[in-house]
Every structure is written in structure tokens, then in C-alpha cells.
């Protein structure tokens, strides 16, 4: 039976849209922690929102630990912490600056894996499958998001290695090494458990399809895997090879001053 992705909100509320725009501005303008974003009235005028929507927007951002609000003269809304650069399924990821946007590294990874995984399906030996399974077992035993990310990377490295194309394998290894070296923080989102179980099941299905040489099951599991990487309520900060190359080309929104 085909696995179904856990349901999530198909459409964002107006408050969620505004919160996402504010997060984007913090990232794109590279505002530091403590930067003054503006006042409630300025946000309401700028986005054309009501006090109720503004309150909900602030609730979302404060629950994420991204903004603080100070009353009185010199007060307003301030940056409390930086948003994640990447939203990957059930996880939020932060990266140190490497000169390359992490989403572009994920794009490179996904394009390499798209071809190499298919070759690995044809070339993988029993020993390769055991190595992929061992990496999966370590990933499944992870107790925190950072360990899970690293475990996932090890499993994908084992899968790509099974393709036996040294030049492309080396490229993939370099991309994965840079992602791992620059990863500064990883957290699971609230209510992540169903998504995490689904992700583990899909990865397990990939291994079983290779083990049994079931090409249809393999292609179906790989599609599910790529779909699972996209956070449906914030897709432009998720790796999606259909549009990810546009990352970094959008003009930043003007910063409001108090």
C-alpha cells in the first residue's frame, strides 16, 4: 500500500503569511539580533492588516522565539533570534555562512541524488544494501534533530556510493561535507512525530525496494522522499528542485525604521 504524507494545513492564514514575510526580511536584510523592526501600527499599515491579525502574527513570531516586543518610548518589535534558513520536512535548520546559500547546496545534493540513486538501484550489491541499512538504523535511533540530520546524510552517502561513479560521488561528498560542517542548529517542529515516522518509513521503503529489485516501489518511494522535504506552509524555504535555483534572486523588502 502506498504511504500517504501526513496532512498539514493546505493554505496559510493571513497572519502566517505576514509572519513568513517578516521572517524573510530578517534573513534577506541580515538583520542582527536586537534590530528594531518597527511598531505595531507600522506593520498594520504596511501589510494592510487588522489589530486581530497583527496580534496573531506576533503570537506566531513570539512562539518561535523570533521577535520581542518592548512597550513605551523607544519600544516596538525587535529581532530576538534569527529564523531558520531551511525548513526541511519536520525540521528547522540553521547554517553558518559559507558563501553559498544552504538551499543551493540542497539543490545540488538533490540533483546529484536524483541520478545516482537510480544507478545505485541497478548496481547495489548485497554489501551495499547492508551498508545503507546500517546507516538507516543509526538514523532511526537518533534522539535529537541534529543527530537525525547527520544520520540521514550518512544514509544518503551510502546510497550514492553504491552507484560507483567516483567523480559524481566526490561531488556529492563535498556538498554533504559542507552542509554538515556549516550546520549550526537543528530542531524538530512542534507535532513532528507523525512526519518523522513517515520519513523513516519512506527511507525504509527505499532500502527494501533496492533489496528486492522492485523498481516501481523504488521510484514511488523516492518521489515521496522528495515531496517530504517540502514544508507545505513555507515551501520557498524548503529544497524543491523545481524552483530552488531562484533562491537569493528576490529583492529584499525595505527595512522599517522607528
Image (cartoon, helix red, strand yellow):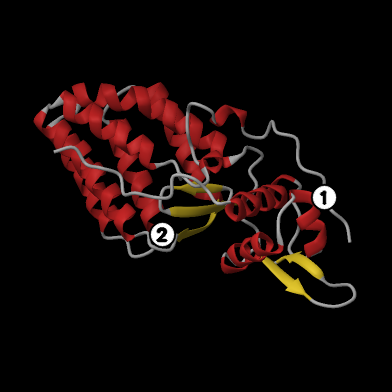
The answer to whether residue 83 shows anywhere in this view is: yes
N-terminal of the two: label 2 or label 1? 2
- Viewer-closest of 223 and 147: 223
Residue under the point 71% across and 58% down: 50
Q: Residue furthest left?
A: 212
Tag in front: 2 or 1: 1
- What's the residue at 34%, 51% (across, down)? 151
Give the crowd class for mark 2: few <14, some 14-19, many >=20 residues within 10 Å.
Answer: some
> Which residue is outermost to the bottom?
72
Q: Position of residue 194 (x, y in %)?
A: 30, 56
- Kindly identify which residue carries mark 2: 145
* Position in image of residue 102 (x %, y %): 56, 41
User: What SS does tag 2 mark?
Assistant: helix
Report the disc number at residue 255.
1
Q: Front-most of 151 and 221?
A: 221
Q: Do the residues labelled 2 and 1 touch (CB within 8 Å)?
A: no
Asked if 195 appears above or below 172 in the picture, the reply is: below
Mark 1 crowd level (few <14, some 14–19, many ≥20, 10 Å Cα): some
Residue at screen point 26% across, 55% down: 140
Question: In the shown orientation, is residue 231 left or right of residue 57?
Answer: left
Q: Is residue 212 above or below residue 34?
A: above
> How far apart in space, not on screen, are marks 2 and 1 (Cα)?
32 Å
Q: Quadrant of the N terminus?
A: top left
Is 17 left or right of 194, judged from the image as shown? right
In the displayed structure, 76 sits above or below 96; it is: below
Front-lying residue, 124 or 21: 21
Location of the C terminus (image quadrant): bottom right
Q: What is the secondary structure assignment of the residue under circle 1?
A: loop
Amino acid at each position: 500500500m502506498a504511504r500517504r504524507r501526513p496532512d498539514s494545513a493546505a493554505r496559510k492564514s493571513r497572519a502566517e503569511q505576514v509572519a513568513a514575510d517578516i521572517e524573510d526580511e530578517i534573513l534577506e536584510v541580515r538583520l542582527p539580533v536586537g534590530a528594531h523592526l518597527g511598531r505595531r501600527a507600522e506593520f498594520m499599515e504596511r501589510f494592510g492588516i487588522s489589530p486581530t491579525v497583527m496580534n496573531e502574527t506576533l503570537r506566531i513570531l513570539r512562539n518561535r522565539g523570533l521577535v520581542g516586543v518592548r512597550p513605551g518610548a523607544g519600544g516596538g518589535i525587535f529581532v530576538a533570534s534569527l529564523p531558520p534558513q531551511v525548513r526541511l520536512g519536520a525540521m528547522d535548520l540553521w547554517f553558518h555562512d559559507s558563501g553559498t546559500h544552504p538551499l543551493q547546496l540542497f539543490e545540488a545534493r538533490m540533483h546529484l541524488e536524483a541520478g545516482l540513486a537510480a544507478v545505485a538501484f541497478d548496481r547495489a550489491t548485497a554489501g551495499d544494501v547492508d551498508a545503507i541499512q546500517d546507516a538507516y538504523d543509526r538514523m532511526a535511533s537518533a534522539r535529537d534533530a541534529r543527530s537525525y540530520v547527520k544520520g540521514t546524510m550518512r544514509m544518503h552517502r551510502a546510497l550514492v556510493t553504491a552507484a560507483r561513479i567516483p567523480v559524481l560521488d566526490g561531488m556529492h561528498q563535498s556538498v554533504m561535507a559542507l552542509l554538515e560542517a556549516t550546520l549550526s542548529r537543528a530542531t524538530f517542529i512542534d507535532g513532528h512525530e507523525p512526519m518523522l515516522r513517515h520519513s523513516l518509513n519512506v527511507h525504509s521503503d527505499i532500502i527494501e525496494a533496492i533489496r528486492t529489485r522492485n523498481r516501481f516501489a523504488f521510484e514511488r518511494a523516492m518521489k515521496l522522499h522528495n515531496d517530504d522535504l517540502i514544508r507545505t506552509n513555507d515551501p520557498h524555504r524548503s529544497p524543491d528542485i523545481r524552483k530552488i535555483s531562484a533562491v537569493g534572486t528576490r529583492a529584499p523588502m525595505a527595512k522599517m525604521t522607528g
